Amino acid sequence: MSNEILQLASVSRTYGEGAMSVAALRNVNLTISAGEFVAVMGPSGSGKSSLLTLAGGLDKATSGEVFVEGTPLGGLSINELARLRRRAVGYVFQDFNLVPTLTASENVALPRELDGTPARKAKRQAKDALRLVGIEDLADRFMDQMSGGQQQRVAIARAIVGQRRLILADEPTGALDSATGDGILEVLRNRAEAGAAVVMVTHEARHAGWADRVVFLKDGRIVDEAASQHDPAVLLAGMGH
Amino acid sequence: MSIKHSLLALLQESPRYGYQLRGEFEERTGSTWPLNIGQVYTTLDRLERDSLVEKDGDDGEGHLIYSITDAGRAEVMSWFAQPVAATNPPRNELAIKLALALTLADVDVSAVVQAQRSASMKLLQDYTRQRRAAATNAGTQLNGDPGAGDANDAAWLLVLDSLIFTTEAELRWLDHCEGWMAKRAATAAKSMTTAPVAAPSQKFAPADQAVSK
């Protein structure tokens, strides 16, 4: 399996045509490997959400190519794209987007069952995913019996269930208080350390601080990156700041 | 930072000698503000001169022990009771740099802002990683509930939180500066309908600004 989970190669996305066109992304190059936690920051309208939408195959690039686990998305049919999304890509949204009439484990099992996995196996995979996010004991609860932080853990479990290694998170802590939000970041961090590639859009610097790499977008372009180094000498130098 | 009051606070706990005081101070604050031993002894001399501490013999191995006096205890209590005074804003090199950059024609202010943002973000990532490790040591739960771990680890956690929130505040301030400058440029462009605003492409940019490839 390739170590590069997500690659954007010279990706541009323009909405509208002619004088009225708006460039949401301009010539973006970005590669994210297994085990990496990347935060995307930038002012409103800088292209953060467009980047996430394109990465997840929910929208198509005007030019350039998006690769998920080595597969170029541009040439896929709508059905092939949907299949790839269910197999390889997990989404985490600010407002959880869970089905209220299903239990936690049913919510997590749903994408597997839609993908043709037998119900019993899907349920087992759901239990495994719930264990990885620390709430296996809440598997039979309905959403209105869970706190916001617990629901977001269900959403993360749904995002990682099966073999999916790309987690796309759009302001995943936006609806949570600070301590609960930190717990969610810890879960995402743990998933990256276990080999997933996590891309998180956030406007909170403190949350971006959990990432290995922070990509700054402005006017649809990547203008800079901050990559944390694991060298202790750098940490000590930072202390003198 | 008040070395004087920090040493008094430690002496209130028990009599100690200079190296012990330095060790305790650094352990409880995560070595964030290293003390040199010369500073410790100079401070102890002054505290003794002011009758806040007194020499209390040696420990048998040639270490001179200091203990706190009643006046010293009163001084510590009063230090904890008083808020930290911020009558004069501490000199902030970044604010000074940006204020000057804004008034000089040859400086690309947004490049200065971005270089700083990137550096501060790296620092924030480093603090966050250290905090995560410290939280594990202090027994903090995944949901953020503080554990009943070691008090020194807990103290170090709070110091790290302070560094994290300060760095976050700096990043928010940089966003604010950038937004403000963008609005200002838009207003200037509107008022100069005949002459467009010059692009800053020829201006100075910090050499160490890493642009993503």
Image (cartoon, rainbow, N blue to C red):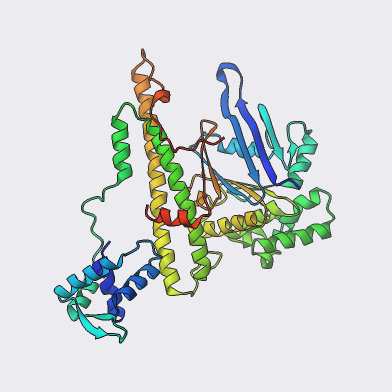
Question: Quadrant of residue A72 in the image?
Answer: top right
Q: Which residue is most to the front?
A: B62
The image shows a total of numbered marks equal to 0
State whether residue A60 appears in this view: no
Given residues B197 and B67, the one toward you in this image is: B67
With A72 as the anchor, is B154 left or right in this view?
Answer: left
Where residue A193 sits in the image (x, y, percent)? 63, 56
Residue drawn where x is 63% and y is 40% of the image: A31
Question: Quadrant of residue A80 in the image?
Answer: top right
Residue drawn where x is 40% and y is 30% of the image: B182
Say if A170 sits above or below A181 in the image: above
Where residue A191 sits in the image (x, y, percent)? 64, 56
State whether residue A93 appears in this view: yes
With B57 as the anchor, is A22 left or right in this view?
Answer: right
Where residue A196 sits in the image (x, y, percent)? 67, 52
Say if B201 sits above or below A209 in the image: above
Residue drawn where x is 77% and y is 34% of the image: A78
